[in-house]
Amino acid sequence: MKLNIVIFLAILIGLMGYAQDLPTDYLPSDFHKDRREKVRALMPENSVTVLFANAERNRANDVDYIYHQDPDFYYLTGYKEPNSVLVLYSDDQIDENGNTYNEQIFVQKRDARSEQWNGKRLGVEGVKDKLGFKMAFNAEEFVSAPIDFKSFDTLLFYNFENDYRDGSENADLYDLIKAFKKKAYYPENYDERKQQLYTTIKATEVENSANVAQTLGRYLNRYEDLQKDPLLSGYMNAKDDNLRKEFKDKISLELQTSNLNSFMLGEIMSSLRETKTKDELRLLKKAIEISAVGQIEMMKAMHPNMSESEIQGVHEYVYKKYGAEYEGYPSIVGGGNNGCILHYIENTKTTVGNDLVLMDLGAEYHGYTADVTRTIPANGTFTPEQKAIYNIVYEAQEAGIEASRVGAPFQAPGRAASEVVAAGLIKLGIISEISQARTYFPHGTSHYLGLDVHDKGTFGPFKPNTIITVEPGIYIPEGSDCDKKWWGIAVRIEDDILITDEGPVNLSAMAPRTIASIEAMMLKSSPLDAFKLPKLD
Ligand code: GLY
Ligand code: MN
Ligand code: MN
């Protein structure tokens, strides 16, 4: 009996140890299930959505890039493997055994040999057990499944970017897409732009054609091949509503032969992903805090003979230490003039010297990414010129954050920040007119943040539980048309702002942002001060 208890305890402790070895704070399967319900609720009647996993991409020879799931696919399933497809139905379907279902997932088959080389697969049973799907199948069953996509009024999918390859697997993404195209009668000359314009025209009363005219005009101006489409140009150039109606009827007739819709899914996903649930906020806050700690540790560790890649490594080490799987985008570390390249990812400068160092990095934690930028003087003290530019960017950011309020237009933070930047640059004599400010501040101030660093959203008025960045910057490259003393100064300050009914909340505030707090943090010692590596020949 005693022995039994000992064995029991040993097993229990072993299991606890095993459980503690893995993160336990992933999104729960209920989150993904709820999101699928939300998609279904937004789908039109008698429609079906088909969503494919991301493609595996080759780096060189027999080495692929690290696989990353398509964010929409992850959002709706929690499944992180390639070669799979999700099918959602707006209305209940009945299988040959009389079972009702409104979704199916087709996933990679378990395969001992492949798993020995490339890691464990969830397989059908794992997807049922861990992700809560009732209707899960091996991917090859999608290839043979008799799904009659033609019987639905609308077939929602994303158009194909042609960057997937036919691998050796039986039912890889290539085979799945091929099977889909056949089942869906997807024409090889499918034109998403034309389909979208036709659909919009069909849905618009001719009396309201002015609503379509702007978009249509933009497309026809930009794409010569669309100008040649007789129905589109006929509609666009119609002299009166009667003639316009004739073209609209012809367009509607043309659309009757196709139920393909490769743009509505994007609209649905954008509307859902813009605002975050409690579970998402939990992971985003974690990713952002991890990234803020990276900035703090780097402020403490910084010294002039560090290299850009070493600085990158310190941030990324902090991310890994907290269990963040990836960076949400390639890390940007630009010393001096390099900071003027907005997405500078080479990070090859060997010593940052006495310049400002622009550090734009974000940890990705369980799929959700931060995006935080700090710009600090490598030697710990801002020069008067650096201070002058930094303070304009800081004030611009303050104005942008203050404007990030529920109901405000998406452009509000950008407008507020731009005004401050322009006024500041004029005051310093760097520019003479507001319109010249774009030379030194050539990007927007905000984007949504979530599973993608530039996350999906509607770009409508701000809603509560949205996270955006506010990231003004001033970049004055060598040779600019201003006093030499400003050359090589590049400053961006970027924080991740949660929009709430009570006002904006800066989730990355932990990382010092004012000149005084940055200089004070840089005075602190770092454990990395003692980290010495042997000199190599
Ligand atoms: N790190 C990319 C961006 O700031 O948008
Ligand atoms: Mn950003
Ligand atoms: Mn950034």
Image: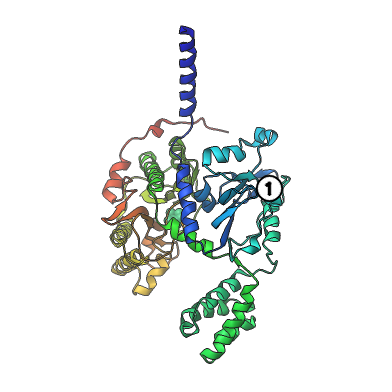
For the image shown, how many numbered marks are present on the structure?
Answer: 1
Classify the position of the C terminus by image quarter. top right
The residue closer to the viewer here, 388 or 294, is 294
| 349, 497: nearer the viewer | 497
Residue at (35, 60) in percent of width and height: 463
Q: Quadrant of ligand 3?
A: bottom left
| Side (left or right) of 312 relative to 82 | left
Q: Is residue 358 visible?
A: no
Tell me which residue sits at (45%, 42%) in the image: 28
Identity, as a three-letter code, of the amino acid under mark 1: Glu
State the SS at label 1: helix
> Which of the 4 quarters of the picture holds residue 152?
bottom right
Between residue 462 and residue 207, name the one nearer to us. 207
Residue that protrudes farthest toward the front in the picture: 98
Indicate the position of residue 471 as horizontal and vertical percent values.
38, 58
Q: How is the image coloured?
A: rainbow
Q: Position of residue 97 (x, y in %)?
A: 63, 47
The picture quadrant where one finds residue 483 is: bottom left
Left or right? Give the position of 28 relative to 416. Answer: right
Q: Residue at 49% of width from left, 83% of height from top?
A: 209
Visible residue check, residue 531? yes
On the image, which quarter does residue 481 sit in?
Answer: bottom left
For label 1, the crowd category at 10 Å Cα-Cα, with few meaning under 14, some 14 to 19 and many 20 or more, is some
- Left or right: 82 in relation to 5: right
- Tell me where residue 12 appears, x and y as whole percent: 46, 20
Residue 516, position as x, y percentages in the image = 26, 48
Which residue appears at 61% of the width and 40% of the height?
124
Residue assigned mark 1: 141
Which residue is nearer to you in this view: 381 or 316?
Answer: 316
